């Protein structure tokens, strides 16, 4: 399992790329910076809109391609929100998510789940379990409030 220490997370983006022997193209660095700088778990479109402020000629296709590449290389994590949109996370530490099925908001859950779950799954299936992913779905406080008003 990949473990990222606090120190590693604070490392400037170019060093992270260089240490993994990746090409240092500008859109790639910019896109990684944008996703790592936010905790909104953005969509590709959100990243594209941010990226255009600093690189007006970047295309949506370039953003998609780089998000995909960065995810394949393990520098970003991808998940689906309750509405089927791909969402990206620059926080590589072990954590769970709470997803609002109404507005798509995704919050991090600091609480770590019962570790014995992994060994129970391993024992039942014969798999070597390296990690797990848990997402909770529901309505965020804002959306619950709107409905009651
Ligand atoms: Zn909501
Ligand atoms: Mn997250």
Image (cartoon, rainbow, N blue to C red):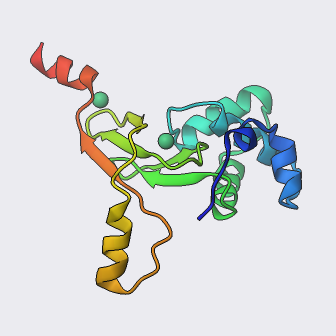
Residue 52: give x, y in percent of width and height.
72, 32
Residue 26 can be seen in this image: no
Q: Is residue 142 above or below residue 70?
A: above
Which residue corresponds to the image point at 54% horizontal and 46% vertical from the top-left?
A: 88
Task: From the viewer's perspective, tell me whether residue 9 is left or right of residue 77.
Answer: right
Which residue corresponds to the image point at 33% horizontal and 81% vertical from the top-left?
A: 123
Task: From the viewer's perspective, tell me whether residue 83 is left or right of residue 44.
Answer: left
The answer to which image quadrant residue 65 occupies is bottom right
62 or 20, nearer to the observer: 20
Residue 53: give x, y in percent of width and height.
73, 26
Which residue corresponds to the image point at 38% horizontal and 47% vertical from the top-left?
A: 81
The answer to which image quadrant residue 36 occupies is top right
Residue 68: give x, y in percent of width and height.
63, 59
Residue 66 can be seen in this image: yes
49 or 20, nearer to the observer: 20
Which residue is situated farthest in the top direction here? 149
């Amino acid at each position: 399992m990949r473990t990222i220490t606090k120190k590693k997370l604070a490392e400037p983006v170019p060093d992270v790329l260089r240490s993994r022997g990746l090409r240092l193209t500008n859109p790639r660095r910019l896109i990684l910076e944008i996703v790592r700088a936010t905790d909104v778990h953005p969509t590709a479109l959100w990243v594209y809109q941010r990226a255009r402020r600093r690189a007006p000629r970047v295309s949506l296709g370039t953003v998609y391609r780089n998000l995909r590449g960065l995810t394949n290389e393990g520098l970003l994590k991808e998940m689906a929100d309750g509405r089927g949109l791909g969402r990206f996370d620059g926080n590589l530490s072990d954590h769970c998510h709470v997803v609002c099925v109404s507005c798509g908001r995704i919050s991090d859950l600091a609480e770590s789940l019962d570790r014995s779950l992994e060994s129970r799954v391993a024992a039942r299936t014969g798999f070597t379990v390296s990690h797990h992913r848990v997402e909770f779905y529901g309505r965020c406080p804002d959306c619950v409030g709107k409905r009651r008003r």
